Structure formats: structure tokens, C-alpha cells
Image (tube, rainbow, N blue to C red):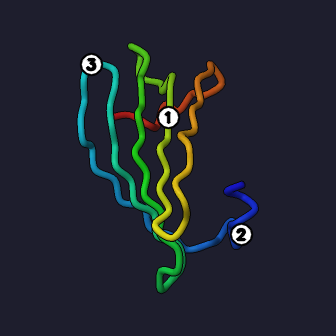
Amino acid sequence: MWEEEREGPDEVFTLATDILAVDGPTAVVRAEVCYGDPPGQEYRDLWVIRFAGDGPCTWFEEWPYWPERPTRHAMTWRSRSLRRPHLTL
């Protein structure tokens, strides 16, 4: 879905994040993404992230909120294929 709504790989956007909570290997992050210059679309998310002892992300749960759209359900990814070593807190 996300790829279908994009203007392309060079689409301008900003991403701002705040760490809200950390408990052991689990973190909660608030994210705000604005697309366009000037911004034309805005999205807000809460992320629940779990990390393995050696750093990679092992669980990612996203609670998206689009201010101009109805509420959506959470999206969850849990697999060994989700290895994001650059996603560390």
C-alpha cells in the first residue's frame, strides 16, 4: 500500500521521532512523517520495537494514524527476516 501512494523513490519527506519508553529490549517510539515540500501529507505512528541481545530488531509493531483518515489497525512484523542492525536505541 505504501509504495502505491508514493510519488517515487525521490519523494521529499521529513521524519521526526521521539523515544517514549524503554524497558529492557522493548522500546516505544512516536514518529511523525511529513511528505512534500511544502508538506501535503502527514502521518503519525507509535512503534513498539523489540531487540535481540546482539542488537537487531526482532519485532516491529506499528500503530499508524492518518489525521485525515479513519482509524486503522496495527501492523505487526515478527520474523527472522526483519534484521535491521541500523535500528538501535
- The label nearer to you, 1 versus 2, is 1
Residue 44 is tagged as: none
Residue at position x 41%, y 24% in the image? 50
Q: Which amino acid type is shown beneath numbered disc 3?
A: Gly
Report, in whole angstroms, how far the alpha carbon at label 2 lies from the one at label 3. Answer: 37 Å
Seen in the image, is 83 located left or right of residue 89?
right
| Callout 2: SS | loop
Earlier along the polypeptide chain: callout 1 or callout 2?
A: 2
How many numbered marks appear?
Answer: 3
Q: Pointer 2: residues within 10 angstroms few (<14), some, or many (20+)?
A: few
Residue 29: % across, % down:
34, 43
Residue 19: % across, % down:
27, 43
Residue at position x 47%, y 62% in the image? 43
Image height of 75 relative to 66, above or below: above
Quadrant assignment, res 22:
top left
Residue under circle 2? 8
Earlier along the polypeptide chain: callout 3 or callout 1?
A: 3
Residue under circle 1? 61
Q: Which amino acid type is shown beneath numbered disc 2?
A: Gly
Earlier along the polypeptide chain: callout 2 or callout 3?
A: 2
Residue under circle 3? 24
Residue 13: % across, % down:
51, 70
| Callout 1: SS | strand
Q: Which amino acid type is shown beneath numbered disc 1?
A: Glu
Residue at position x 72%, y 54% in the image? 1
Q: Residue furthest front?
A: 70
